Amino acid sequence: MKPLNPLVISGREVLPLIEGGKGISVSNGESSGSWASAGGVGTFSGVNADSYDAAGNVIPQIYTGKDRRARHEELIKYAIQGGITQARKAHELSNGQGRIHVNVLWEMGAAEQILENILEGAKGLIHGVTCGAGMPYKVAEIAVRHNIYYYPIVSSARAFRALWLRAYNKHSEKLGGVVYEDPWLAGGHNGLSNSEDPKKPEDPYPRVVALRAMMRELGVKDSVPIVMAGGVWWISEWEHWLGNPELGPIAFQFGTRPLLTKESPISHAWKTRLLTLKAGDVYLNKFSPTGFYSSAVRNPFLQDLHERSERQIAYSVDQVGEHTEPFQIGAVGKPVYLTPGDRAHAKGWIDAGFSKPLRTPDSTLVFVTPESAQQILADQVACMGCLSACHFSNWSQNEAGTTGHKPDPRSFCIQKTLQNISHDGDVEQQLMFAGHNAYRFATDPWYANGFVPTVKQLVERIATGF
């Protein structure tokens, strides 16, 4: 195999191997510090990271505010303190090796405020920031202000062009790299555009060639690497990318593989589940309250969301066209109108126990059990504003505090489920993000007999290419 040459990333020559930053405690100071210590770039999550008490126990993120705005302020405080805590831990464990990056989602609630305060509170400990899930125009300005490098996450040349023309051209000196995250292969939230078919994956090579061509056209120096993220397992499978003049310098990001290491903070149950996955077990779906597609493991949690949307019919507030059948939603108030066929579907679902119809923002009804309806409402009421705008609860961090649309019962509270899976080991009734190559844990002989490597062993193994 061609040699895997070091690259200058965030001001230091390191292995071109980057730990992807998973949200809410899934990539933390221990995992990222260990990755940096092995000579690569470790990335901890700045999304509601954990803090610890004097005994080293995780401090539960409990919200006591009486309204969303008050709980949102509590969330910001938790996020800032947690991010600073994990930065310090990563710095300590890195032993002065590699680089430490922080990852934030631009669509998370108060992203700018949280990032600014983490960087201020962990001054000198963080060398770069990666940012995606939206169009992070201001991340460049923030990075320059704190004298670190920034790494936007994009899924197309067009997205990078928009970012460059609007903001990045003014702060080009701190553009450390551009992360191309494959929207069909990466885990977590994906950048599929409306013009792309989620069921028709595209070869990443021509898309990354187009990205480099766009970067050159815009005047970005060839020394700025592109980071390939999503679907990377062994470097030998990407050998034709190394030293390729069409692509320029390339680094590789690993999001899913670091989950299965001794330093990974995820539960034993989660690690065990990863070793049993089969091809197709990771599901590209659009249930996220962000409105983005995301990739997660098929389990009862996702199955319930899928079936919930299947039990869905359109309604009209007036008797018009084929909507002739009156249907009473609550005990009081005017009925809505359904088509005769949908009225029959509704009766069948009600008879099967899905007796609570809930309105969606799209003038449809979804049918759930009374218990599920009660839980959905409780989760919506308990919203703490973890996103800049949430489809599920209709929270928005604007002055009105709302998106202006009805809450969407076809979605879920992402803060709740990601906190739960991060801390209690339930892998069936919670959202489990993973990349689409996660099934390879079960087929790769390196993981035979349930072998779980240290981060150092994993980085060294990846660096060999095989």
Image (cartoon, helix red, strand yellow):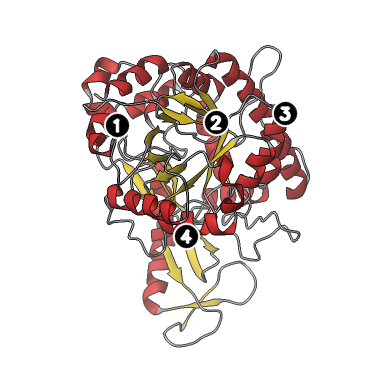
Q: Where in the figure is residue 363, as x and y percent of width and height? A: 52, 71
Where disc 3 sits, the SS reads: helix
Q: Where in the figure is residue 107, as x and y percent of width and height? A: 58, 50
Crowding at mark 4 (Cα within 10 Å: few <14, some 14-19, many 20+): many
Q: CA distance from mark 1 to mark 4?
A: 41 Å
Q: Nearer the viewer, mark 1 or mark 4?
A: 1
On residue 233, the disc is: 1
Q: CA distance from mark 4 to mark 3?
A: 47 Å
On residue 367, the disc is: 4
Crowding at mark 1 (Cα within 10 Å: few <14, some 14-19, many 20+): many
Q: Nearer the viewer, mark 4 or mark 3?
A: 3
Where disc 2 sits, the SS reads: strand
Where disc 4 sits, the SS reads: strand
Tell me which numbered mark, 4 or 3, is placed earlier along the sequence.
Answer: 3
Q: CA distance from mark 3 to mark 1?
A: 35 Å
Q: Where in the figure is residue 310, as x and y percent of width and height? A: 38, 60
Tell me which numbered mark, 2 or 1, is placed earlier along the sequence.
Answer: 2
Q: Disc 1 residue type? A: Trp
Q: Are marks 2 and 4 in contact (CB under 8 Å)?
A: no
On residue 2, the disc is: none
Q: CA distance from mark 2 to mark 4?
A: 44 Å
On residue 121, the disc is: 3
Tell me which numbered mark, 2 or 4, is placed earlier along the sequence.
Answer: 2
- Image check: 240 left or right of 32? left
Q: Disc 2 residue type? A: His
Tell me which numbered mark, 3 or 1, is placed earlier along the sequence.
Answer: 3
Viewer-closest of 303 and 44: 44
